[in-house]
Amino acid sequence: MTTALTSETQTVPTKQRILYAAAELFRRRGYSGTGLKQISDESRAPFGSLYHHFPGGKEELGEDVIRQGGEFFRLLVESVWDSAPDVVTGVREVFDGAAETVGTTDFQDACPIAVVALEVASTNERLRIATADVFESWVVSATARFAAAGFGKRRARELAIALIAALEGAFMLARATHDTTALHVAGQLLADTVARELDTLR
Amino acid sequence: MTTALTSETQTVPTKQRILYAAAELFRRRGYSGTGLKQISDESRAPFGSLYHHFPGGKEELGEDVIRQGGEFFRLLVESVWDSAPDVVTGVREVFDGAAETVGTTDFQDACPIAVVALEVASTNERLRIATADVFESWVVSATARFAAAGFGKRRARELAIALIAALEGAFMLARATHDTTALHVAGQLLADTVARELDTLR
DNA sequence: TCCTGACTGGATAGATCGTTCTAGCGGGAC
DNA sequence: GTCCCGCTAGAACGATCTATCCAGTCAGGA
């Protein structure tokens, strides 16, 4: 190892390096498409450390990645949303920001849990529930913002669900087609809908 | 083998059985989450036949599954859409029909290529392009229907992209949360948008 | 009848999978 | 000092992965 790497291993704890490397690999290559050996290499953590920090093995690591990645993404979206002057531009900027991230990472980084969510939906109940919890937390977060903007409770939640769905689907199209148009289009449609309904409320 | 199985192998060609079994497994468990042994078992085809019919191995089989599954799904959606009295109910019935399918298959069967599309987007360029081609064919199909309803070319394509994205994202939420609400909400929002824009066109 | 080629059936190889196990390191408590 | 323990480091295991290989089967044409 070089001095630079050694100093890096001293500053960032091993467990965190493992989590970060696993999150990146799961997000890009999927859960079953990523090997533990690959995670140990990428994080520069010895194999044994993996099972020391995550005694439950790959499944425990997967659950931690889903929940922590989900929370991180929620905070990220909330910071973008809340720094916008109003809900309508907030919605659009969430989608535009997502489009920029996808574009600048060579269409690799998008939703942190999307691939895993689809992979485990029919194969691993523990991880499926973890992804369901994360999606619900996102819906709750968006619902609160729509409600604060004046929408009724029920409609706020419907818009939140539609927003998450549109965001995920647009992510999928963007990564597959190497084109961020879907994100811009979906964001604009959602923003327009919110703006119009907001007008009729007043 | 029992007589029943033998008679079945006589009626359905081996290659088609392999394709069907692979399509079902890929759709539910993903590309890297499905083994060739599993496909050979599920399709009741000997292992050697797999490489006889698909000399390119798993990758060739994967591409065929993506393209054929994509076309089958397009025809299915078109048949639902075209049997509706107008575009607005057509859109809503596509989503409601999808919700019914997802619900009746224990949240397993949804989009035939979604899982694979996300898995291979950053790992396998050949398969990624196959999924991109399929998505584009769906967009073209939906664009034609919106255009036929009176929308301009550009807007028709935007609505088509938003529809596919919303459908895929809602599929994801539904499978993860075991709840078809997202499909109904997204379908209603899309249908409302189309109805309203159609009104202003006249 | 015999040949041919498509297809079946499965053994096998080499790599990699997730997991377990144990030895060694190093710094703080006593 | 010396004991202890969190953590590192990687060998080893059985299972499973994709892919290759070949013998056997069968139908149709020469």
Image (tube, coloured by chain):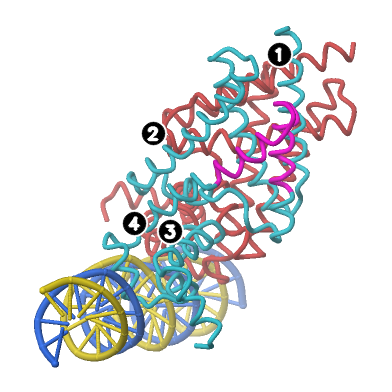
Chain colours: A cyan, B red, C yellow, D blue
Q: CA distance from mark 4 to mark 2?
A: 23 Å
Q: Amino acid at mark 3?
A: Thr
Q: Chain of mark 4?
A: A
Q: Chain of mark 1?
A: B
Residue, disc 4: A59
> Which element carries disc 3, helix, strand or loop?
loop
Q: Amino acid at mark 2?
A: Asp
Q: Residues within 10 Å of mark 3 (few under 14, many from 20)?
A: some
Main SS class of the magenta portion in the image: helix
Any mark on residue A111, and which?
A: none
Residue A83 falls left or right of residue B196: left
Q: CA distance from mark 3 to mark 1?
A: 41 Å
Q: Are marks 3 and 1 on the same chain?
A: yes
Q: Amino acid at mark 1?
A: Pro
Tell me the mark number nearer the camera, choosing from 4 and 2.
4
User: Horizontal and vertical percent for residue A111?
Assistant: 58, 48
Tell me the mark number nearer the camera, choosing from 1 and 2.
2
Q: CA distance from mark 3 to mark 4?
A: 18 Å
Which one is nearer the viewer's eye here, C9 or A39?
A39
Residue B88 falls left or right of residue B122: right
Residue, disc 2: B106
